[in-house]
Image (tube, grey):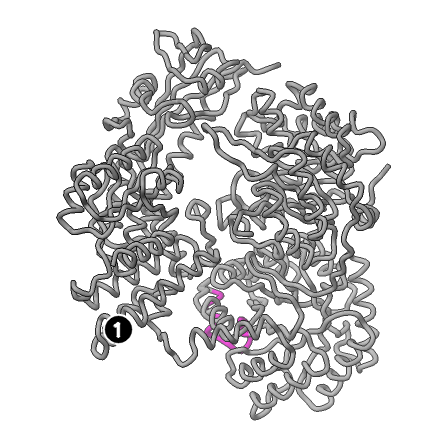
Amino acid sequence: MWKRLRACPERMSTGHVQEFNDVCEYTRGLLRPRFSFGRYKIIKSDGGILELKGGYCFRSNDLVKLTSESFAVAVIATTVGDEVNDLVQKYYEQGRLFAMAVADAVSSVAVEELICYVYSIIPKANEITTRRVSPGYGDFELSSQDLMLRLSKGYDLGISLTENYMLIPRKSITAIVGLNEALS
Amino acid sequence: MKLYREAFKILAREQVVLLDGAMGTLLQDKGLSLSPPDELNLSDPKAVQAIHKAYVSAGANIILTNTLGATKLRLASYRLGSRADEINRAGVALAREVAGEKVWVAGDIGPLGEFLEPLGTLMFDDAYLEFYRQAKSLIAEGVDLIVIETMSDLREAKAAVMASRSVFNGPILAFMTFGESGRTITGTPPEVSAVTLVAAGADVVGANCSIGAQKMVPIIRSFADNVGVPICAKPNAGLPKIVKGETLFKQTPPQFASWIPKLVNAGASIVGGCCGTTPDHIRAAAEVVKDLNPKPRKNHRGTFASRTSLIIVDAPVIVGERINPAGKSLFAEQLAKRDFGLVIDEAKAQVNAGADLIDINVGDGENADSIMAKAVCEVQNATSVPVSIDSSRPEVLEAGLKAIVGKPLLNSCPVSSRAMTEILPLARRWGSAVVGLALGSKGIPDALGQLELIEKFIDRALKEGIAIDDIYIDPVMTSGIEDVSRAFEVLRAIKRNFNVRTIAGISNISYGLPDRSDLNVAALLYAVGIGLDLVIVNPLDAQIQKAINSLSIFSQSKRRIGAQVEKVLEKGEDSKGELYWAILEGQCEKARTIVQDLKTSMKPLEIQSKFIIPALEKVNQLFEQKEYYLPQVLKASEVAQLVLKTIELDSNEELGRIVFASVAGDVHDIGKNIVIAVLRSHGFTVYDLGKNVSTSRIVSNAKKYKADIVALSALMTTTMLEMRKVAKALEENKIESKLLIGGAAVTKVYAKEIGAEYARDAVVAVDVVKHLICDKN
C-alpha cells in the first residue's frame, strides 16, 4: 500500500501513519469483491483474429500472439463495487486529501489482488496460464469491453459500460488469459 | 575449484570481472512463454542453455543461473511452488554444463514480488525462509557465487543476504535497483544500501536494472565512496522505451560498451548487463574490459544507516540516550502497557535537537524482547536516523536487530566469554556495529586491565568476522574522580594502541553530583578532544546542545554544520513561525489553533504570503528532492486549504482562475482531484467541472468564469484524444485561456502537438500554472 502511494511510512509522522491505518481499515470494510469468468475453446488464432467457440471474435495481433500456444482462453471480470468510489468522492469533498488518496489506493490494490486471485484459480490440473491482458493495452481495443463483459458474465455482477467503454464501478477490471497444456 | 570470498575480492580489486547479460528479455525475444521464465529450466532447457553458451563465448567470466524468480513463494503464483527446488537445481546444472573450467556460475536470486512489513504484509522471517530455501537449492547443485539482484526494499535485500550467508561461505554479490532520482522506490540511496548490505555479509554490492549506464555512474560513485568492497554495475541496455505496449531497449552493443570505462572509473570492478542486453553487448564489453584496471579504492570509516540516511563517523556522533526507563517510572509503566507515545516523542525531540543516532533501551522487564521490537519499529517510523539497540540480554538485542532496516549499533557486549559467545555472532549475522564494554566478569579493572580486555575483545570480534570499522570500545564512564581519570586514560590509550573507534556515556560521570549539566559539558569537550567518536548524551540539555554545535565548527563536521546552517536558515529569527511548520508537517489541529490567533493580528494576505506560500514551496522542494512523497504533499495541502478557508481571502486577492475537468469519456478523477487540491492550497481558484465533461461544457465554463487556465485530465490513450477537440473548440470560440493537460497517458510531445502546456504531477502543475498566469498578466 505504501508502495502504491510512492511513500515510506518512515517519512510520515505517527499521527499520519495512524490515519493511514484507519482509512485502510475503513475502506476495506466497504469493499464488495465479486468476480466471474468463462472458459472458451479457441477455434482459430491467427491473421489478427482470435475466434472462440460460439462465434465470438477479438481482433488483436497482441491477443493472437499471446494465445498462439493456447487451446482455450478464460475471460475474467472483477469488481470491488461502487461504495469505495463514493467514499473517495466524500473524502475529496471534505478536503481530506490524504484519506482520499489512501482510500483510492486501497480499492485499486483490492481489485488488482482480486484479479490475481481469480487468475490463480483458473488453471485446472495440467494447464498453465499465459500472462493476462486487458482491453486498452497494445492493440487490444477498449471497444472489446462489451464482448469481454458478455463472455465473462460481468454484466451479471452489476458492471456496466459508459459510451466510451469505461467500466462502472470504476474499480473493475476485465482480462483475458490463454490456457496452455502443461508440459509433462 | 572452490571460490573463496577473500580471493574473489582480491581478484575484483586487481582486474575488471565481466558478468553475463539479460536472460529474461532474450527468452522473451525467442517468443517463449515466460510464465514463469525459470520454469524453462525444466520445459525448454536447450533454450536456456543456448543463452548461457552465447554469453560464455562472448567472454563473460561469470554466468547467472536462470533462477531470478525461483523462490517458492514466487513460483507458487504459477502453481509451481512444489517444484522450486527442482527448478533451481536444474538452473544451476544447465549453467554448470556450459561454464567449463574458466567461467564461474552464480546462483541468481531476485525479489519475492511482495514487500516486507511495514511496507507490505510479508514478515521478515517468511522472507528469510524463502531466500534460505532457494540459496540451499542453488548451493546443493554447486554454484560458485550467489548474486542477489533487482532488490528495491532494503529489508528484503538484507533478508536475502543474511539467508544466503547462513548457508554459503562463498562470495555473495548484492545489487539493488535505483530509479532516476538516485534512490530505490522505497527511498533508499546507494550509500545506505552499500553499508547495510556489506554489514549483513555481502562481499560485493552494486546496482542493476531500471536505468541505463549513464544514470548509473553517479550511483556507482556513491557506492565506491562509502564502502571498501568491490562494486558491481549491471545496467540495462539504455533506458526502456514503451512502443506499442512493448518494452524496448535501444542501446547498441558499442554504445553500451562505451559506458563501461566510465562505470569502472566511477569505482566498479565488476560489470555486466541487465534487461535488453545480449551476448553482443557482453562481447563488446569484453573487448573494452580487457584494457581496463579497477580504480584503487580505500575506505576505512565507521558508518550507520537507517532505511534512508547514512551517518559517517567523521566527526563526533551524538547518540541520544533518553529512551531508557531507568529512573523514569512513567516511562516504564507505559512500556509495560505497550504504550509507545513517550518513546516516539523522545525520539523525535532528540533528533530535532541534533541526535545522529537514537539509543533504545526498554529495560529488562517481562517481554522485553517484543517491547524492544515494537519500540525499534516506532522509532524508525517516527524518525529517519539510525538506531542503537541497548540491552544486556542477547534475546532482547536480537529482537531489536530483526526489526531494523539499515545498519544499527549493538550496545553492548562485556568482555566475558559468555557474552562474547552470545552477542558477537548476533552483530555479525545481523550486520550491526558492536560496542565492546571494557569490563570483565569481575567488574571494571584498572586501566591496564581494561586495555587487556579491550585487546581480547577486538581479537575475538575480528575472528568472528566483524570488520574493524564496526568495532567500538566503551571505556565505561562512572562518577568519582579516580574513575573518570581512569576512563580518560583508557580512552587516550585506545586511540594510541588500537585501530578502533570509541563510545562513552558522558552523563554517567556526573551521577549524584551537583551542577550535572556543567560537568557533562566539560567531560564532553574533554573526551572529544582526546578522541571520543560516539558521544552518548542527553541532546535536549541546552548546554549540551550549545557545546555540540560549537564542537561542530572545530571538528569541521559537514553533516552537523550543514544541519546548523539549515536550522538557522529555516528556523532562525523565527521568521516563518509555527504555522509554517504546522503546514510542512501536515498538522491540521495545530494549524487551526495557530491561525485563529494570527487572524487577530495579521491580514489574510500577509498570512498567506508569510506562512502558507513559503511552506508549500518548501513542500514542493522536498517532493522534488524525494524527501517528501505524495502523502506528505497531500497532508500539507490539506492543512493549507484549511488555513485558507479560515483566513477568508478577498475574492480580489485571488491568484488566478482555473477551470478543471476530466475530458469526455474519462471517468477517472483521482489524479485530477489531487492536482486541484494542491492548486487550491496554493491559493488558486479552481472550478472543478468533474469527470466525463463534454467539450461544449468545458468551453462554456471557461467563458463563464473568465478562466486564466483550462486544465484537462485523461487517463486513457483513447480519451486523451478529446483534449485535441477541446483545444480546437477553445480556439474557435476565441477563448484566451491557456490550456494545461496531464494524466497517465498524456505526454509532453502530445501537449506540444495540440498547443497545450504539460505537467507530469501536481507539484509541477503548480509551477506551470504560476508561469502561465505570470505570462498572461
Please report the residue visible at 29 percent of the width from the left and 55 percent of the height from the top.
B679
Badge 1: few (under 14), some or many (20 or more) residues near its Cα, within 10 Å? few
Q: Quadrant of residue B680?
A: bottom left
Across and down, in percent, residue B313 comes to: 66, 69
Is the residue B684 above or below the residue B43 in the image? below
Q: Is residue B119 magenta?
A: no
Across and down, in percent, residue B41 comes to: 67, 24
Q: Quadrant of residue B689?
A: top left
Does residue B298 appear to the left or right of A177 in the view shown? Answer: right
Q: Is residue B335 magenta?
A: yes
Q: Quadrant of the N terminus of chain B?
A: top right
Q: Residue furthest bottom?
A: B514
- Can residue B257 be seen here? The reply is yes
Please report the residue visible at 29 percent of the width from the left and 56 percent of the height from the top.
B775
Across and down, in percent, residue B532 comes to: 69, 77
Is the residue B166 above or below the residue B722 in the image? below
Does residue B655 appear to the left or right of B554 in the view shown? Answer: left
Does residue B625 appear to the left or right of B671 in the view shown? Answer: right
Closer-to-camera residue (A32/B726): B726
The part of the chain drawn in magenta is B322-336
Across and down, in percent, residue A68 comes to: 51, 14
Q: Residue furthest left?
A: B704
Closer-to-camera residue (B395/B152): B152
Report the number of numbered marks. 1
- Using the image, name the chain to which the residue with label 1 belongs: B
Mark 1 — residue?
Answer: B606
* Amino acid on which the number 1 mark rests in the picture: Glu
Is the residue B563 above or below the residue B689 in the image? below
Closer-to-camera residue (B442/B12): B12
Does residue B331 appear to the left or right of B453 in the view shown? Answer: left
Is the residue B337 above or below the residue B239 in the image? below
